[in-house]
Amino acid sequence: MEAEGLAIRAKDIAMSAIGWPNWRRLNQEGIVFAIAILLFAAAALGLPGFLTADNLVAIVRSVSVLGILALGMAVVIIGRGIDLSAVAIMAMSVAWYLQLLNTGTSDGLAFVYVLAGVLAIGLLNGFLVAYADVPAIFVTLATGSFVFGYVRSQLITQDAVPVPGGHWVELLGGVRFLDIPVEVFVFAGLAFLVFLFLRYTKWGRFIYFAGDNPVAARNIGVPVRPMLVLRYVLSAFVALIAGLLTAASLHSINTRIVNSTLLYDIVLVAVIGGVGLSGGRGGVRNVLVGAALIGILLNAMTIIDIPLLYQNLIKAAILLGAIIVDGIINPRDEQTAQQGDI
Amino acid sequence: MTFRERLQAWRYNLVPDHLVGEILTKRWTDNAIPFLALMATLGVFGSVIPGFFKLTSLQESTRQLGEFSLVVIGMTVVMLGGGIDLSVGSIFALSCFSAVYVFFILEQSIWLALVAALCTGLVFGAINGYLVGYLRLRAFLTTLVTFIFGRALFDILVTAYAADVQLSQASSDVLDFIGDGTFWGLSVSVWLAIILAVVTHIALTRSRPGWHVLAVGGSRRSAHNAGIRVRRTVFMTYVFSGFCCSIGGFLIACRLSGAGPGTGLNLEIMALTAAVVGGVSLGGGRGSVVKGLMGAIIVLTMTNGLIRLGYGTGTNQMVLGILLAVAVTIDIRWLKNRHKVLNEVYVAPVYLKMGETQSAAPGSGTSYELDNRLSAADHIGLGELEGPEDVILDRDDHLYCGTRHGEIVRFFAPDYKRSEVFAHIGGFPLGLAFDKDGNLISCVGAMGLYSVSPEREVKRLSAETARSWTSIVDDARLRDPNDCDIAPDGRIYFTDSTKRYDAHDWALDSIENRATGRLLVYDPKDGSTKTLLDGYRYTNGVCMAHDGKSLFFAESWACRVHRYWLEGPKAGTAECVIRDMPGYPDNINRASDGNYWMAWLGMRTPSFDLSLRHPDMRKRMTRRLPQDEWLFPNINTGGVVKFDEKGAIVETLGDLSGNAHPMVTSMREHKGYLFVGGILNNRIGRYKIEGADPNWTSPASYWGGKP
């Protein structure tokens, strides 16, 4: 087996030495990037009004919030986890914040409440995953459901909560540099920060170690459990930022977004760009590639005027394709697959 | 006895603490938590909501329960196989739509609608199964995506055809009956759920495909290596789930006569919560249909109850979220810590005040006085043997012993230098005896009573006895068969030392000191095993008296020897013949001069005797200290004792040097020599007995001269 592997690797090296294209090295990120470019070219040629400055800004803007959420998700996924409560935290924390403002709580106090709430949910997620050893999928599914249910039934009165007039969140939505809305800059800034964090800090490298092999990481002294908690807290705060930006651009927050497919879009952006679901692989670049493809696709579909329901169908089909390709490229082995790894 | 000590004796001997541990070893205790939760839920909502238990109210909620239970049964089977199916809501909705479409829009018969629904479910399930089973994708994400896909498709279809369904004139009595009618007081959906639950339960517990599902869920790799078709099994679980959902979808189509945007909404998280709350384990292998159903009732009662109590939007999700988080956490923690809890509570020591004993110290002048004679013994098989608990010689002077590797080793006469593995049985062969036909009978620790013919054919004679009515742990099983002997009529009398511990946990049994040792008899005529005596502290050696009318057996932890009468006026009763010895007795065998040899596996110590009067201390000790710091019987010194027919001690042999035979578990006299075995020894000793009959052999003593 090993000899065979070595032989193949030797053949690879020989092939690349003579300059033939090496299909083995073509990874998911490359494929997705190529598709995104093709799609972009096709849309630029075929769709009127696609290649205008306004539309390009609109594309970037439309994926900004999605991209920000996907950054948080990517950090969690690289550490071999998943955060299904992200959308619930995003919508419900901001809805609660706005509700507090609308009922006359002072801004500072309201913000402290919300920060504390977000921190608490992040800690709860992290604690249950890290210290109670409960699978992340179930923890975050449960807390997501709880956060939505609790805030919707106990703290707010309507599905949609408007931003009070003249509040800084409303003003934030109007801020533009060079005709580009602020969320694009926030997305770019966060992407750069996360990139620095993952690539150049000790803690960022530790996330890869823990995602690749948690037991080995623990054995070499990485504080695997506290860092797990940290990731879920980070993800929760990223969700809060995304929520504030959403509220800024729409002047209100609609909690029904929790029941929409936004959550799956986030996973889609991260996974389709090549962040491996089994952890330890991927980075900010993968998120950007995934966001580019989804942004172009959504924009093109909107321009062609495909109804939202069909857009969901198409997105689901693409996500399914991405997962199948991921499964074929990285097949699971009966001998090494982990028990209970669902 | 002080008052404090008397209180302790009552507390630890009368309160049956050990039952707690025994109950916890049962698999059915897994059901206890969900069952209590079920009772609590029904109790709370039944008392808060007026008319909760009224027939009409129940009928309406059970109708919904029937549909929901069907979905949960499917989910349970998938989870037992180690997967998860989040697309149940979509399959449910799409099947419902298929039935509605065929019936209301195509205006076909209701049966065709049923077929359409079933096909939809099976196809959707097969897609899931193919992706997860054959392509081995991650179940959670894959079914999450097929769920979105199915939901999007359903939303499109419902929007397109809702108006047409409203306008349709189609109607059918069958549909109305399925939707609204009852049969013997129960609605069709409940009947279907009950039938499917029973069939699935039987399939899972008593059929090959069901076992395959549990095997794959329990350990996918082992199932694969055992030759089970893992992929096909996983595939079938998803198809089954699709099938269950499609029936549910068909039922709701009949009940609501249509399909709406709310059909099957949130069903996946409800079904998942129900299965987990019921106690079906994530990751597979543990759970049952009954658990799934308990969970279904809990979840549906809670969500419906909250709606009827008038709580607003979102309450359902909140409650489901809490339920899911709590149930998953309990499930994971319970699985992880169950054995720890069990270890904590299983050992339940009792109070015992050992009687005063005579000293065995050299120079004490008592009949128990140990000397150094055994240190002069020759050794046989030094370094080749591990754990010759018992030794025996046959008519041709060959020497046999068991080893801890589960083998019976034979050393060849006359010099006992050469050896061979006579037979491999497994377990730990302990007591040995030859029957009339030269078969070697052995009590095999952790296995039972076995026979090895002179042709080396291994045969199991007995591994169980009748179960007692009040037992909680299975006391039919022989846990620690220890020694055996054979009566003139061929019946084999043997001991089973403890009911509560496996053979290798004998130290725990000594610390607990609970009297659970038994004397049993195996009758070769009809192959039956009967329990003769029960309630002794570690029954050990057995020896037929020279006249064959009674037998002696040792009670190790109480340091006593009893005589059990086979014939005569006291037949069937036991009496104590030696009590309060300074050592723990092991095997007993006949001596050439009409007396009996008895091994001491270790000596009593004042400290352990004192600890027997402090059960609380021993309990704390087993909980808080690592095993190698426990106080338990000293087995580093022992000896050989000879006693006569009345139980009087004749002489005592020891090895004070501690080099050759510090502990002795067995000895066998043969042609003027004493062969000495010890369960922790690496040799067999051969000691020349002064003045012994040089022609006496044990087989001749039992079965007469050479045939």
Image (cartoon, rainbow, N blue to C red):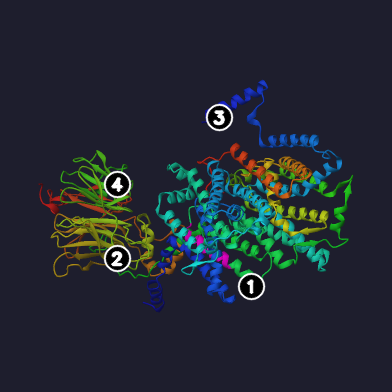
Q: Are marks 1 and 2 in contact (CB under 8 Å)?
A: no
Q: Is residue B292 magenta?
A: yes
Q: Is residue B401 visible?
A: yes
Give neighbour class at mark 2: few <14, some 14-19, many 20+ (Cα, 10 Å).
many
Q: Nearer the viewer, residue B171 or B6?
A: B171
Q: Are marks 2 and 4 in contact (CB under 8 Å)?
A: no
Kindly identify the amino acid type of the residue bearing the numbered disc 3.
Gly
Q: Are marks 2 and 3 on the same chain?
A: no
* Relative to B423, residue B354 above or below: below
Q: Secondary structure at mark 3?
A: helix
Residue wearing tag 3: A5
Distance (Cα) linking label 2 and label 3? 64 Å
Residue wearing tag 4: B425
Q: Is residue B53 magenta?
A: no
Kindly identify the amino acid type of the residue bearing the numbered disc 4.
Ile
Which one is closest to the eye, mark 1 or mark 3? 1
Q: Are marks 1 and 3 in contact (CB under 8 Å)?
A: no
Kindly identify the amino acid type of the residue bearing the numbered disc 2.
Tyr
Give neighbour class at mark 1: few <14, some 14-19, many 20+ (Cα, 10 Å).
few
Kindly identify the amino acid type of the residue bearing the numbered disc 1.
Leu
Q: Are marks 2 and 4 on the same chain?
A: yes
Please state if B248 lies on the left or on the right of A196 as rendered: left
Give residue A17's position: percent from left, percent from top: 66, 22
Give neighbour class at mark 4: few <14, some 14-19, many 20+ (Cα, 10 Å).
many
